[in-house]
Amino acid sequence: MHSPTVFVATADLAGQVRGRSVPSDSLDRVLRRGVGWVPANLALSSFGTIAPNVFGSTGDLRLMPDPATRVDIPGTDDDPGVSLLLADQVLLDGSPWPCCPRTFARNALAELRERTGLVVQASFEHEFMAPDLVDERPFSFARHRNAEPFGSELVGLLDTVGLQPENWLPEYGAGQFEITLEPTDALLAADRAVLLKELVRDLARRHGQRVSFAPLLDPAGSGNGVHVHLSLRDAEGRLVLHDPSGAGGLSDLGQRFAAGVLAHARALLAFTAPSPTSYLRLMPCRWSVGGVFLAERNREALLRICPTSTVGAADPTSQYNLEFRAADATANPWLVLGVLIRAGLQGLGESYTPVHVWPEDVTETELAEVPALPRSLDEALAELEADKIVSSWFHPDLLATHLAVKRAELDEVAGLSDRERCARIANAH
Ligand code: GLU
Ligand code: MG
């Protein structure tokens, strides 16, 4: 059965999915011509206010839906279905709008491919809290069952719409769950990260349950991370991150890619961890990220070399991947992907010294000299402005709008306690 409406959407700098709906019988026309959109919408904050911006009341765009992103959320007796499509933001003549986050990701991937022949596979792992399903049994079968029928319906829905669910699990924190998707082409993986959160929220709404992907709901509680897994293939389709003779099994190419990410990490965080409470999560001893370093399998590393297994005669090279752990769901997945690719490309292209690969059991004392993460969003934004390489990747209007939106969000929660800040951000995400 056809859904009565089609919602054409983009994801913005506040990590929100926004757009317009049309009757489903106009889908063909909308696929050809798009729907109208407004440049100043890019300046909307997580709290729904418009930050100061260069666009003002002028200008018009089109949201051009990509049919490959379409998911059909089926209706139930009392709740209509909808088709959701993600879109590129283009100018009225169809040319790319230089501030479109999805275009930013696509361009970064295209440039990596043009300059190195490399293509990227990715997977975004999401953690979230369902505060109505709180219990104190981390990883337990009891919590898994307690979340029914929501859990089974979620896995079924993700499967039906083609998001390829991999794991659905009760996580450590009270009421915390995690959902992972199979790795896939990187742009598609970022599209799926945008869609996944909406599918989870929409299903929770149907069940009358609250969910939040915010980095922290309670300053003393567990954090919700978004861990981004990356692997690289060369033009011949060979996986190129793994070299058993390299430190930690990481190839020379992988070490240079990682070096670019580490060298610019403090500025990248302004995009990957862009909310006022992101930095309460990013602290040592939280299994989020304890500093700017690369390590084998250690869950406090900014970049983690993930484990591989030979059980069942599995091939380590096909599993080998790098995990970026300093992202959260207040970020725009296209920008997260785009900045990681640009930073990695920077490492491949310049004379970056290959990074040090710390062993899994590296101690806090040994890590004393690795660079610290920014301690606040304020600090990350200052790092972004100071990093002329990272700043240069963005159209000046996109960069200025990002800074303005994030500073507006900081102003909005200024003067609140950490607990109150967490509550504000949790409401918005
Ligand atoms: N919840 C942790 C985070 O904030 C991650 C725990 C894990 O390794 O799954 O990133
Ligand atoms: Mg987890």
Image: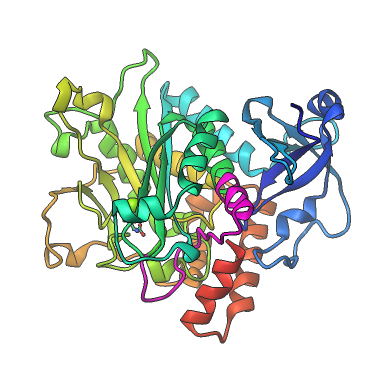
Residue 401 included in the magenta stretch of the image: no
Residue 214 among those drawn in magenta: yes
Q: Main secondary structure of the magenta part?
A: loop
Q: Is residue 233 left or right of residue 113?
A: left
The quarter of the rendered structure image containing the N terminus is: top right
- Residue 227 at x, y = what percent? 38, 48
Task: Tell me what residue is drawn at x 27 percent, y 24 percent.
Answer: 318
Up the image or down, 118 lies above or below 16; here it is above
User: x and y percent of residue 53 in the render?
Assistant: 75, 62
Q: Residue at x 46, y 66 (%)?
A: 278
Q: Is residue 214 visible?
A: yes
- Horizontally, is 295 left or right of 215 in the view? left
- Which quadrant holds residue 363? bottom left
Which residue occupies the foreground of this view, 252 or 152? 152
Quarter-wise, where is residue 199 in the image?
A: top right
Indicate the position of residue 134 as horizontal and vertical percent values.
42, 66
Query: How many numbered dots are placed on residues in this image?
Result: 0
Give the residue at x 29% y 59%.
Answer: 138
Residue ID at (20%, 39%): 307
Q: Position of residue 80 (x, y in %)?
A: 75, 42
Give the position of the C terminus as an image quadrant. bottom right
Tell me: 187 left or right of 103. left
Asked which colour scheme the image uses, the reply is rainbow
Which region is colored magenta? 198-222
